[in-house]
Image: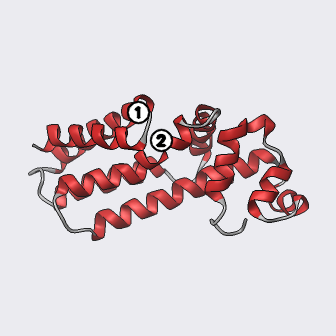
Amino acid sequence: MKTDDNVLEVLRLFATYGFRKTSISDIAKAADLSRQSIYNQYGSKEAVLEWAVTTFLGNITDTVIHQLKTTDGEPAVVLSKSFQLWTGDHVPLLRGTPHGAEILDAAIISVAKASRNYEGEFVDAITTFLWLREVFPTKREAEETTFVLNLASKGLLLKSETSEAYALGMKRVIKALLG
């Protein structure tokens, strides 16, 4: 698993079976590696989960930041797509699996120990996007709006049963804030 190819499959295993019931054998099978390779590379199941969470978040963060910097179009549409990539696409993993909430809790712990501030990078990218696109006349207004958007996104993650419900809710929030 030196590449990121299997990260989502590993997270799905943990979300489906829970941390306790997911075995190194399950992880090895999903990664198409031997159990010994997993132990040699990570040393523990905890380290595998931490790798999966931080790799997953790093990939998403990089993708969203790239999109915000390079995508033309209406700001509301670009924001909707960005929040969908950041959060909405992952509603099924968190809400549609028996242990999604457990994995979310583990992710919060992993992120606190991570060398990157994924959420901070995301928030900064949204703020910069809003300001550079002149959606708001001052950076401070862009920061305040980003704060509200991010809180709404978290609330919708907890409330939404599907990615589609999240997307509809986020579009409503964006329309209310941007007009």
Task: Kindly state the secondary structure of the residue where label 2 is placed.
Answer: helix
The image shows residue 32 at horizontal and vertical percentages of 78, 65
Quadrant that contains the C terminus: top left
Which numbered disc covers residue 91? Answer: 2
Residue at the extreme right: 36
Left or right of residue 166: residue 47: right
Give the class, few, some or many, for how many residues have Cα within 10 Å of label 2's Cα (few <14, many ≥20).
Answer: many
Q: In this view of the protein, which residue sits in the foreground, 179 or 47?
A: 179
Tag 2 or tag 1, which sits nearer the N-term?
A: 2
Residue type pointed to by label 1? Ser
Left or right of residue 41: residue 141: left
In the image, residue 131 sits, relative to residue 168, either above or below, namely below
Residue that carries the numbered disc 1 in the rendered image: 160
Q: Residue at x 18, y 64 (%)?
A: 73
Give the class, few, some or many, for how many residues have Cα within 10 Å of label 1's Cα (few <14, many ≥20).
Answer: some
Q: Quadrant of residue 157?
A: top left
